Image (tube, rainbow, N blue to C red):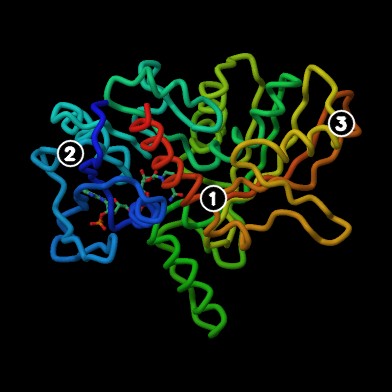
Amino acid sequence: MQKKDRYNVAVVGATGAVGTEMLSILETRGFPVATIRTLASPRSVGKSCSFCGRDWPVDELNESSFSGIDIALFSAGAERSRTFAPVAVKSGAVVVDNSSAFRMDPKIPLVVPEVNAPAIARHKGIIANPNCSTIQLVVALKPIHDVARIKRIVVTTFQAVSGTGQKAMDELLNQTRALLNFRDVVNEVYPHQIAFNCLPHIDTFLSNGYSKEEMKMVNETRKILEDETIGITATAVRVPVFRGHSEAINVETEKKITADQARELLAYAEGVCVLDHPAENVYPLAIDAAGKDETFVGRIREDESVENGLNLWIVSDNLRKGAALNAVQIAEKLIRG
Ligand SMILES: NC(=O)c1ccc[n+]([C@@H]2O[C@H](COP(=O)([O-])OP(=O)(O)OC[C@H]3O[C@@H](n4cnc5c(N)ncnc54)[C@H](OP(=O)(O)O)[C@@H]3O)[C@@H](O)[C@H]2O)c1
């Protein structure tokens, strides 16, 4: 990408949960922005988004949205990405796409900068951002994979409602309020009540009995770690948490790695923060991870049921590292070359 002092940036889906976070992260990390274009659906025309102390009017996403744009951060759903990412590329922009539209396309790099930043160089205009639950998983597991080679991963997720977007956050709030006031709840976003409940159902179910979210974790993890031989099985659960996904992970490795070795390895890993003093009630919590950039790892212990196994508890802010921050970090790598 052509080097410039400042770049024209478009945020597609700027009014959404991830888009709002993207604007805030571009600002706080001092991304060299010349102009910002905030794009959303026709519903948002007339609204504005705040960026660097100014209100920017929201424009409707259309075929002419990308003229003069250098970098387009997409976060408006797979359908919009499929239609408009090629339009942005044709206009000369590089697209970092948060949706699932291009993630498994073998020609399109799927990137978590701490794990596989060199893949960015292979882009032909589009770089895909992985699914939120995959990002935190690979940030924490890559250092272990590098020294001990992971053979199998068993993951169970506890995913916040913000992973479904703004409407789901409103639904959890409204249902909680209704139940505490002895009123009936309305289920619009999820098929069942989410307040005071856990739903073993994220995205649609596939013919193999897994949900799409579960299979995204399987396929994306293999692509990012560039290892098709890793066995992965996932159970994805939506929990009544606003922000921050938690994951219980069991890994089996080829070489023995003790809990102490894993703790030390992760203490030095980029993007990871180890919080692991269970005797003092110190372990990662979604409420503490919310608003932070790191992937927090704790409850590191050896799996006593197998020869070479570890259990870990991994928590990260799904809107930041799981989406907006990862996308901005990719854009930072792009402009730094
Ligand atoms: N939330 C997460 O943790 C997370 C993590 C990773 C990836 N993602 C992905 O990021 C994307 C957005 O997620 P979100 O959580 O931010 O959802 P959201 O809060 O529902 O926001 C959706 C955004 O897309 C825009 N949009 C919807 N339909 C559009 C259309 N026809 N034309 C133009 N813009 C349109 C919306 O604009 P209006 O306000 O005008 O409707 C809004 O800005 C999805 O692809 C999602 O899979 C989300």
Give the residue pinned by disc 1: 293
Q: Which of the two labelled residues, at mark 1 and mark 3, occupies the earlier sequence position?
A: 3
Discs 3/2, front: 2
Q: Which amino acid, mark 1?
A: Asp
Q: Which residue is at a point 68% across and 21% down the rendered structure image? A: 146
Q: Secondary structure at mark 2?
A: loop
Viewer-proximal residue among 226 and 102: 226
Q: What's the CA distance linking mark 1 and mark 2?
A: 27 Å
Q: Secondary structure at mark 3?
A: loop
Give the residue pinned by disc 3: 258
Q: What's the CA distance linking mark 3 and mark 2?
A: 49 Å
Q: Is mark 2 within 8 Å of ligand 1?
A: no
Viewer-proximal residue among 195 and 308: 308
Residue 226 position, x and y percent, is: 55, 17
Residue 112 vs residue 72: left or right? Answer: right
Q: Which amino acid, mark 3?
A: Thr
Figure label count: 3
Please rate how many residues cluster around mark 1, counting C-alpha atoms within 10 Å: few if below 14, some from 14 to 19, many from 20: some
Q: Is residue 248 above or below residue 227?
A: below
Residue 97 position, x and y percent, is: 34, 36
Residue 276 vs residue 68: left or right? Answer: right
Q: Residue furthest left?
A: 64
The C terminus - image quarter = top left
Give the residue pinned by disc 2: 69
Q: Is residue 221 above or below residue 28?
A: above
Q: What's the CA distance linking mark 1 and mark 3?
A: 27 Å
Residue 107 occupies quadrant: top left
Residue 75 position, x and y percent, is: 33, 45
